């Protein structure tokens, strides 16, 4: 199990320029989903999972029970920092991740069986953060094998006082810390839809609010991954709110 920590300082990485394909900003392969969770297939992507957190549920047990088929948390105490049980609840139609500077939270979206077997697909989340300066989040596709060189895709990722970015990591053993990356240019402080479109072995396209911000054709995974997020246990108090999550399988 990965214990990757979002850094306190502004996140940086090595830009592998040859891998980043120029795409005119404002183009996209799918319509912007807007403020409601999308319904239906999108091109070569077949929708398999949607959660809009419409049922209120308290932390410390109620949320885990209510959303057992949508959210697979890290066991409390993982890495000495992740405590999803006490930090995650549902209110006002959102998944609310409480930031208290002492406890982080992490887990995987999807069913207990289906969450671990994505080989390609589209992954979308609508999210915003309030407060939490000095802390940050990393939404990611992480290999089910837990072998870093099988490919790590992070989007959105960044400290909450900065602009979220994407980071597509090297699949060369020993060089996994390097990445191709680009900023969204938007703020965590407003609602935005972040989407990743992954075609195994060919490309990963990154969109914010339906607009392409980058397409990467190097270091593209081919094996099973899970879609998840991690939030650290430092920084100011606040909240990470997740309005909805939707995942699709690639059927190209």
Image (cartoon, rainbow, N blue to C red):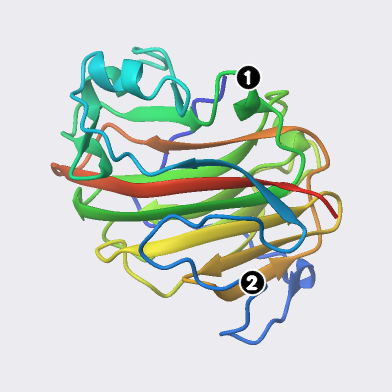
CA neighbours of label 1 inside 10 A, class few (<14), some (14 to 19), many (20+): few
| Labels 1 and 2 touching (C-beta < 8 A) | no
Q: State the residue in front, 239 or 37.
A: 37
Q: Report x, y in % for residue 20.
A: 72, 71
Q: Report x, y in % for residue 200.
A: 82, 49
- Count all numbered tags in the image, as a single digit: 2
Q: State the residue in front, 93 or 208.
A: 93
216 left or right of 68?
right
Residue at screen point 53% across, 55% down: 39
215 left or right of 57?
right
Q: Quadrant of the N terminus?
A: top right
Q: Which mark is residue 198?
A: none
Residue 219 seen anywhere in this rendered image of the structure: yes
Q: Report x, y in % for residue 146.
A: 67, 24
Residue at screen point 78% across, 67% down: 19
CA neighbours of label 2 inside 10 A, class few (<14), some (14 to 19), many (20+): many
Which image quadrant for residue 142?
A: top right
Q: State the residue in front, 119 or 201.
A: 119
Q: Mark 2 or mark 1, which is nearer the start of the sequence?
A: 1
Find disc 1 in the rendering and name its residue: 113
29 relative to 41, above or below? below
Task: State the SS at label 2.
Answer: strand
143 left or right of 228?
right
Find disc 2 in the rendering and name its residue: 214
């Amino acid at each position: 199990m990965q214990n990757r920590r979002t850094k306190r300082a502004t996140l940086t990485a090595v830009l592998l320029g040859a891998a980043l394909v120029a795409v005119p900003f404002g183009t996209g392969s799918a319509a912007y989903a807007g403020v409601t969770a999308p319904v239906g297939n999108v091109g070569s992507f077949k929708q398999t999972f949607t959660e809009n957190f419409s049922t209120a549920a308290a932390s410390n047990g109620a949320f885990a029970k209510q959303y057992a088929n949508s959210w697979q948390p890290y066991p409390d105490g993982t890495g000495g920092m992740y405590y999803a049980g006490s930090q995650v609840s549902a209110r006002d139609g959102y998944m609310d991740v409480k930031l208290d500077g002492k406890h982080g939270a992490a887990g995987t979206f999807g069913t207990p069986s289906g969450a671990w077997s994505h080989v390609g697909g589209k992954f979308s989340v609508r999210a915003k953060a309030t407060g939490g300066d000095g802390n940050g989040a990393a939404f990611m596709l992480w290999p089910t094998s837990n072998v870093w060189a099988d490919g790590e895709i992070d989007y959105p990722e960044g400290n909450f006082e900065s602009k979220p970015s994407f980071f597509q990591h090297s699949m060369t053993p020993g060089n996994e810390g390097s990445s191709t990356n680009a900023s969204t240019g938007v703020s965590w402080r407003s609602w935005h839809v972040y989407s990743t479109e992954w075609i195994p072995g060919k490309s990963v396209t990154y969109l914010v609010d339906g607009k392409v911000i980058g397409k990467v054709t190097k270091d593209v995974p081919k094996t099973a991954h899970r879609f998840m997020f991690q939030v650290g246990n430092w920084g100011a108090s606040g909240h990470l709110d997740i309005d909805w999550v939707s995942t699709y399988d690639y059927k190209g």
